[in-house]
Image: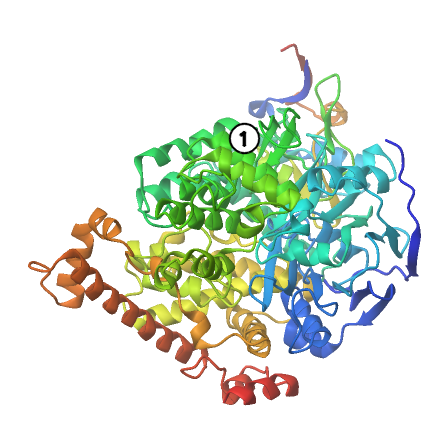
Amino acid sequence: MNKLERKLLAEFKYDLKPVDKGYNRRTLYINLDTYEIKSKPVTDMMIDKFVGGKGFDLYLMWHGVKDSTQWNDPENEICISFGPLCGNTNYPGSGKSIVTTISPLTGIPVDCNVGGHFGPYSKFSGWDAIEVQGKAAEEVIVHIDGDEGYVRIYTAPDQEINSHIIAERLIQEFADSEDKYQNVSVVSSGTAADHVNISCLNFSFWDKRRKVARLKQAGRGGTGRVFRDKKVKAMVVKYSGLAGDTNNAVDLDTLQQTGIKLHKEIEKGDSSQCHMREIGTAHLMEIMNDYDLLPIRNFKYGQMPEAIGLASWEFKKLFTQGMPDGCWFGCSLSCCKAVDDFVPRSGPYQGHKVCVDGPEYETAAGCGSNICIFDPKDVVELNFYCDTYGIDTISFGTSVAFVMECYEYGILNKERTGGLDFTWGNADAALELIHQMARGEGFGMIVGQGVRKMKALFVELYGADPKLMHDIGMEAKGLEYSQYLSKESLAQQGGYTLALKGPQHDEAWLIFMDMVNNLIPTFEDKAEALHYFPMFRTWFGLQGLCKLPWNDIEPDDNASTDEPAKVPEHVQNYVDIYKAITGKPMDKKLMISQSERVYNFQKVFCMRMGKGRRIDDIPPYRAVGPVTEEEYLSRIERYDGHLRDKVGIDPSGMNTAQKMQALREYRENQYQQLVDSVYKRKGWTPEGVPTLEHLSSIGMDLPEVLEVVKRYL
Amino acid sequence: MKKYLKTFPELCIACHTCESVCSNLYFKQEGKSCIVITENTDGIEINACNQCQACVKVCPTQALSVTPQGVVMVNKSLCIHCYMCVAACPTQSFFRHAENLPPFKCIACGACTKSCPTGAIKIVQDKE
């Protein structure tokens, strides 16, 4: 390949120095308006109150944006941070980056936890976070050379920006030699991110065995759109000095021993527990279908016989087996499976042989069952094009499901979709829609705006019933729901809809605790779970860790512990490795305290940007109960039973519409009672505003935070 | 082809000379041997790599390679010290020591066999 002629636009030399107990104590600031590049100090206050990772991202972004900042204003930032535990090669799941920006879908901060090598290499290149602000006058790439201590901005004449191409080409261009490709990682998006809001970023890692750039996604909230709006084609990092002690841990022996303990647990247990090494998160497909939780027809149903076509064993046939598929070194859970030598049947790469990352569960459900596509190869092709074009598979799946339901009801027709037939299960139409998004044309430009904007448009243009649009449009705060049915789990309705960035399951996944095992029956129980688990899971984002090795593998005796849902032994592992790396005190309560400060800061940040109110925490009714008669009738025994047993109404003698109304009133009331309990447990007012006393008690009473809160009290 | 250290625990008298030879040869000190002798109530166990290669496939950096003789070797310049190999070893014969970042294992050099007074360890070559 001929080397591209790149013009150097800016260069910043910095001193290389070792990481100290997990921290560099400096962050990298890049302004694309002025091409200013500088180092900013990390203060003791930042570490004490914000820890790292998502905490640093939000702190930097808070001071970079204004109250009025929109996603495409130049002062909006993309922050990428890593956390003090990030990059250790010993404990599985330790290579995560956390990306934040003001989202084009929600207008508030979105945070994504993403794998790949970019985060650890950037950290070991000398930075605790990267803050990108401004918009470049021309297309650029940003290069961090962690071997020589340079940050450079170059022009980007690169023709191809689709991720599977540009990631590979930039690795080839910036690596010292072919045997050093593994030392380079790229952040990129794709052509669709130039046009649509439901976009993502791809973080690469070089797969030495497959000899391809693998791609992990910072999927939610439109990060790719902001990236491309800033005219960044890619960010590239090179770092060659990785070793087991690069984090300069204070107690390397404990870190190593704790890691080996979990490696052995995974070796022994994965093949009888989650099969992550064989199938990744797609192992959930038939389990969710069995429990009536797999989204089908825009979350209308949770189970369908046809869904067996997407069972994990079908994906296993496609995934290459026996590979160390960790997205960071030392992750023996190896869940990022890949389909090798896949040949797309559509689009610009038709006939090429490509490597496709996934599908993971969310993609298999979103681009599969939820839109009634039951051929795994169609799902793989949708997955491939979403990734390389820079589209979020979750938002894409939920958006297309909404479109297909509107098509079924006659709100949409071929005339309105530019000739596309959105009958349930039409993979050809879904693929063409993706290609339209990449080309910036046609109905793809409508769907790519996301469900919230489509709802308003369909009311305005086609006279759709606003109430129906609100009930079946599966979004909250502007973000599309991820792929679990929450109708029968009140706690999960809260887990989704109270999540700060929008309905993503990474704050709390309580369906089994609540619906299946009935472990949290009262409002207070549910509120406690909706306090603890979001705080506990926030901790992963502060440290640069992955959630999966916490509870997708469990110790043999976990079920006999006091609180199996918390996986106590693994929580202790996190306490141990935090202390081993940073040398700072830590216990199970301090973990929650660290998270609570940052969680409430993010909450106030949302309020500052005009959301974060109780009204923003209302789910569409599809997430709560049956919207349509056919939905009610499909589970009539369940719903009639609820009326009898929970509502105290005898359904005999009532027609379906009356029963639906009675159930709806009950469930919506239950949800509001849950919100009351959760807000109270979190130290917030009934309007969802953190109280001054609470902020003071958790140590998040910074003047700028109190100033925002006082506007709402 | 597989060259490996074959063990005959019934002949072992647990003098631990093999451990001393191995550790001093590779680390110039005691306590880091690639062969480990354990005395327990059931008798004596000899633990050394049988070159089964289970570790090779889990290494994320391809730091483990197999020689034409079938011996698994660690390339220290590629190893990033994740110890997935240590956990993946079905016979617990891949070792880690706190003072030594790269993991280590028997490479069937045969140095220990020369010091064994009872012939409890031998280098053999299987043709598979």
In percent of width and height, residue A710 lies at 55, 89
x 28%, y 59%: residue: A518
Secondary structure beneath dot 1 equals loop
In percent of width and height, residue A79 lies at 70, 63
Q: Amino acid at mark 1?
A: Phe
Badge 1: chain ID: A
Which quadrant holds residue A370?
Answer: top left
Which quadrant holds residue B23?
Answer: top right
Which quadrant holds residue A604?
Answer: bottom right
Q: Is residue B106 left or right of residue B9?
A: right
Q: Nearer the viewer, residue A605 or A426?
A: A426
Q: Is residue B27 left or right of residue A255?
A: right
Q: Quadrant of the N terminus of chain A?
A: top right
Q: Find disc 1 in the rendering and name its residue.
A: A319
In percent of width and height, residue A479 lies at 51, 60
Question: How many numbered marks does the figure carry?
Answer: 1
Q: Is residue A408 visible?
A: yes
10 Å crowding of disc 1: few (<14), some (14-19), many (20+): many
Q: Nearer the viewer, residue A632 or B7?
A: A632
Q: Is residue A524 visible?
A: no
Query: Vertical placement of A230 versus A322: above or below?
Result: below
x 65%, y 73%: residue: A50
In percent of width and height, residue A433 lies at 55, 41
Query: Vertical placement of A495 versus A176: above or below?
Result: below
